[in-house]
Image (cartoon, rainbow, N blue to C red):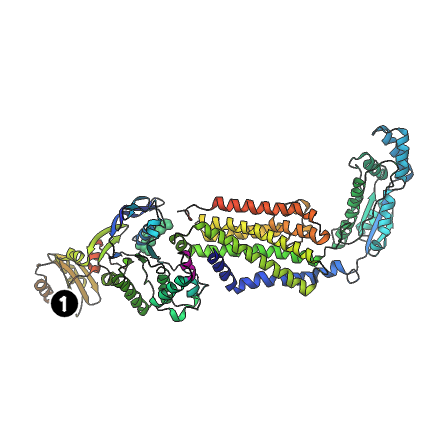
Amino acid sequence: MRSFIKKDLLIFLRDWKELLTVLLLPIILVIVLNFAFAGLFDSGDEVSMDLQLAVVNQDNETEAMEQLKERLVRDAAFEEQEANAILEAAGEIQPVQLLSDYLESDDVKEWVTVHHLEEKAAAEKVKEGELDGMLVIPQGYTADSLYASFAGEPPTTSLIYKIEEETTDSSALQQFIQGFIEQLNYQFAMQEITSGTEIEADLPEGGMEDIGAAHDFTMTQYFTIALGGLFALFVVATVAMKTGVEIRDQVFNRILLANSHPMRFLIGKMASTICLVVLQIIFVLLVSHFLMAVFPDRSIAFWGGVFVMIVLLALVLSGLAAIYTALLLRMNSVDAANGIFMFFTLLFGTLGGGFVPIYMLPEWLQQIGEWTPNGLFLSILTEWVQFEKLSSIFQPSMFMIGYFLLFTFIGLALFPKRGRAQ
Amino acid sequence: MLETINLSKSFKGKKVVQDLNLYLADGESVGLLGPNGAGKSTTISMISTLIKPTSGRITMNGVNAIAKPGEIRSVSGVVPQELALYQELSAYENLKFFGSIYKLRGKELEKAIQQALEFVGLDDRKKDLVKTYSGGMKRRLNIAAALLHRPKILILDEPTVGIDPQSRNHILEAVRALNQTDGTTILYTSHYMEEVEQLCDRLYIMDHGKVIAAGTKDELLSILSTENKIKVELNKLDEAFVEQVKTIEGVHKTEVTELQLKIIAAKGSNLISKLVHLTEQHQIQLLHFQTETPSLEDVFLHLTGRTLRD
Ligand SMILES: Nc1ncnc2c1ncn2[C@@H]1O[C@H](COP(=O)(O)OP(=O)(O)O)[C@@H](O)[C@H]1O
Ligand SMILES: [Mg+2]
């Protein structure tokens, strides 16, 4: 077995073009992307945005309390007394107030200017391009969102956000407003409301952070991990292509003729894939780290966790290599097989956030993306970088092991018994 | 002894090898001669157990080798027609890997590698990557890789295609030495008649998937014992003359190359006097003529109507 692994490693390492591609290209890309995105997200003063937002309030907050009480008693069958207690608590929340506090907060004020306007005037100004967008608080919004949170039902009215033209500025604005809306709903859903409990909604902070994150998850970290994973896919595709050459050049026949069990060939491929992927990702991560301080001040335990994740990804990809090898032995055309491998590399790469930052994809694609090996790797490490909690990465790690077993099983099942289908 | 009985192979319904009966006795050197596409490589692949025949049997010392490919694999070395080498590895690394899959280890492996390298004359270049080798060197290494485990039977599929004469002689000498000093049984395929003539005790001539003649060289030549081959050189040549030559009684074949005319005719057909007579009629001068003993090439021509290199 050692000789199988040794020859695969030697052949891979001799190919210096390939080696440069999988080792240096991701690092160069991380550096380039890091610079390209740094202006956009990290330093607000370099690229200053001044968004003009119209806020149209059609809701009447004094009426809201009456409406809320009526609905609590009528629809949710609360006792008069209970309803009063809830009203008292609710009086302190005032979603509309929260929203304007958010828009007036220091973080947001820096780049958003709020104009309170009537709907018609606002619409006109947005149309003329004087304003970037408008936010309409519809009639009954307060009553409805409060009712929804107390009765535990989804709200029926929601904030309406309108823009005239999709521009970088306006869509950035939309993202932040959307963030606020989701945050608010989330807070309501999370807090168990019993009478007498102080209700408080946390305001989200601006920027890319999640609530309660122990560490920020930066763009540079994203690129380093995503590109490391992407190029690991290329390593597997390259191993497969070299296997194709072995089969086309008939060296594989020599292995059969030596009466050496063809399964050793397959397992050798898996083992060398593990070695190559582990070495490649560690190289990319460490060099990026030393060049750009990607993961500053992290503990040994953190790095240990990262290493374990890399090994898990390498295992999954070795399973993929097993499938590729079995397919190569089954298919007549090595070129067609290589085409299939390239297709999967690009597919997994795209879905897993290797080419386009994953949050730029539509929601449903993001969810599919997390099911690709590299996408899963990215999402596990995203958690790990922020929280460094074993409990939060345990389950996805089990998925990784599941993938490894599944892929290996498929590879073995597809592997032709005599070594080659004739 | 290795034997095939009515061995046949079809690819997608196309018969590539048909009812091939062939045997290899221990210590023999046997040639398989035929033009490109005759089915030689397909035959070799079946005998070396790489592909399964469509029908027919292969036995090794009486044991069914299709069911038990190990019977043949363990005693044979195969030199495939295409180079089966890792281009990115050195000669030494290639041999080390191929030796290790034959379960050779440590000192034994090193010794086998060293002997194989010396045998094919590549010892001084063993550290260089195969992709930097000349065609002839690659072919020699291709052979060395089949010798590491000291096979009793060596099967070579056109090992000298497209290489320089020096490498070619080296290979032929090496194969002969293996057969005569080590007693290795040889199965050698080629479309070069001279090689097979030089090396082999016995040969099979294949065409279109079938064996069309078999035997020792003399036996095969005796197919032509009833024929004479005459080569004449003339000062000019015209169609009418050649047509008339063809009508001479006993003439089987004529072949024209510039001012040369080759004629194959039945023995004792009194050809020469008739030919001289004809040249006088056509006012052609006969510059030179010679009768030749037929070669295996002529046997092939006689049997198929084509030359080996068509
Ligand atoms: N795998 C294959 N599939 C289809 N046809 C094949 C295959 N291998 C060989 N052939 C055909 O079989 C014939 C004999 O080929 P081959 O055995 O290589 O001849 P040779 O070695 O004598 O030149 C050729 O016509 C070739 O095209
Ligand atoms: Mg051939």
Q: Residue at x 52, y 63 (%)?
A: A13
Name the chain under label 1.
B
Q: On the image, which quarter does residue A251 sit in?
A: bottom left
Task: Between residue A119 and residue B43, name the one nearer to us.
Answer: B43
Local crowd at mark 1 within 10 Å, few (<14), some, or many (≥20)? few
In the rendered image, residue A61, in percent from the top left (x then y), is placed at 90, 40
Could you tell whether B87 is left or right of A381 in the image?
Answer: left
Q: Residue at x 53, y 64 (%)?
A: A17
Could you tell whether A175 is left or right of B293 in the image?
Answer: right
Q: Secondary structure at mark 1?
A: strand
Number of numbered labels in the structure image = 1
Which amino acid is tagged 1? Gln
Span highlighted in magenta in the image: B96-101
Residue occupied by mark 1: B290
Image height of A40 relative to A319, above or below: below
Magenta-drawn stretch, dominant element (helix, strand or loop): helix
